[in-house]
Amino acid sequence: MEKFHILHLFTSAPNLSPFDVNMAADAGWHTLAPYTSLEVGDIAGLVQDAMFSRSPSGIKRTGIFIGGRDMGVALQMLEEARKVMFPPFQMSVLADPSGAFTTAAGMIAAVGTRLRRDHAADWKGMNSLILGGTGPVGMAAAILAAELGASVTIMSRSAEKALAAVENCRTYAAGGDALSLAGAADTDKAEQLAGADVVLATAAAGIEVLGAAEIAAAPVLKVAADVNAVPPSGVAGLEAQHDGTPLPGSQSGAVGVGALAIGNIKYQVQHQLLRQMRESDEPVYLHYESACEVARKYAAERDG
C-alpha cells in the first residue's frame, strides 16, 4: 500500500490558519496534523517522533509546515528542525508565518514587474520605503528588496520600533550586515518621500499610510503597493484589484499595485512551495528567499 503524504503543521500561536490548512490540502497533502502553542524547544522532540516512525521511503512523504505570527520564531523552528534531521531521515520544511513570506514575495515580484514594464527599471538601486514595516510582511519584504539591491527604509510611528525591526532583519538575513537597511519614524515621511522610488504599505488593515497629498508631493515615486484588501486602502486612490493603474494625482507617473494583484501571486507561490515539498526526492528547507525565487519566476512567465 502506498504511504500517505503527511504534513505536520507547527505553530507558536494558539490556532492554525485555516488558509494554510486549505492550501496544504489543495496541494495534495493527504493528512494534516496540527500542533499549536509550541515553543522552539519543542521542535526537536516532535521532529524526531516524525522521523523515526516511518521508513526512508515514508519519510519522503512526510513534511513540516511552520506557521505562527512571529518571523524570528518561525525561522528558529525551521533551523531546529533542520539540525535534528540526518540521512536518510530527512523531511522537507516550509516556514511561512502568517503567510508573511509568500505575501512579501508576491509583493516584491508584483512591484518588480511594474518597475520593469512601466519604468524600465528593476529593484537594484531603488530607494524603497516600507510603511508600517515592523511586522513580518514588512520585515520580509525589506530583506528581499535589499537582497535585490534596493536601499530600504522601514518606517513606523516609533523610530525605536523601526530601528529594532532593522536589527531583526539583519539578524534573520544571511549577510544581513551588508544590506542597505535603515529605520525612521513616520514624522520623517515627507523627507523620505522626496527620494522614494517605491513605497510598500504593510501596515494593519484599514489604515491609510500614504495619502493623496503625499503621492502628489513625491517627485520620483514609481510604484506604490498595499498588501491589505480591507478598505480604506493603505494607499490613497489604490484599489485591491489595481495592477499598474496610475495613482491619482501623481506628478511622477507612479502606478499602484493592490492587495488582490499581490494575493494572486502569493497564492501561486504557496501552492508551488507546498507541492515542491511533496514531490521532491531530496529534502528542501524553504522560507522567504525560496518564496521570492518562485514568485519572481511565476510573475516573469505570466507577464512575459
Image: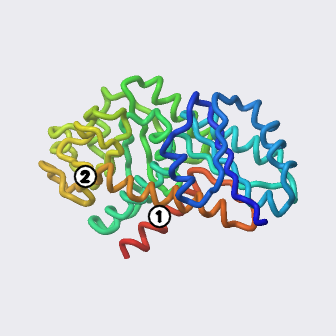
Q: Residues within 10 Å of mark 1 (few under 14, many from 20)?
A: many
Q: Would you say 76 lies left or right of 121 here?
A: right
Name which quarter of the figure residue 30 lies in: bottom right
Q: Would you say 89 lies left or right of 150 here?
A: right
Q: Amino acid at mark 2?
A: Val
Q: Is residue 228 visible?
A: yes
Q: Which residue is mark 1?
A: 296
Rendered image: mark on residue 57 = none
Q: Would you say 208 lies left or right of 228 here?
A: left
| Residue 7 image offset from top left, x and y in percent | 67, 50
Q: Which residue is mark 2?
A: 220
In three-dimensional space, the C-alpha distance between marks 2 and 1, rounded to whole angstroms, equals 24 Å
Q: Residue at x 76, y 44 (%)?
A: 81
Determine whether the residue tagged by mark 1 lies in a helix, strand or loop.
Answer: helix
Determine whether the residue tagged by mark 2 lies in a helix, strand or loop.
Answer: loop
Which of labels 2 and 1 is toward the front?
Answer: 1
Quarter of the image for the N terminus: give it. bottom right
**Position above or below: 71 against 125:** above
| Residue 62 image offset from top left, x and y in percent | 73, 55
Q: Residue furthest front?
A: 1
Instruction: Looking at the picture, tell me which residue is in the foreground, 112 or 71.
Output: 71
Q: Residue furthest bottom?
A: 304
Q: Residue at x 32, y 30 (%)?
A: 188
Q: Would you say 29 lies left or right of 234 here?
A: right
Q: Residue at x 76, y 66 (%)?
A: 2
**Position above or below: 260 against 272:** above
Instruction: Looking at the picture, tell me which residue is in the foreground, 197 or 19.
Output: 19
Q: Is residue 175 visible?
A: no
Q: Amino acid at mark 1?
A: Arg
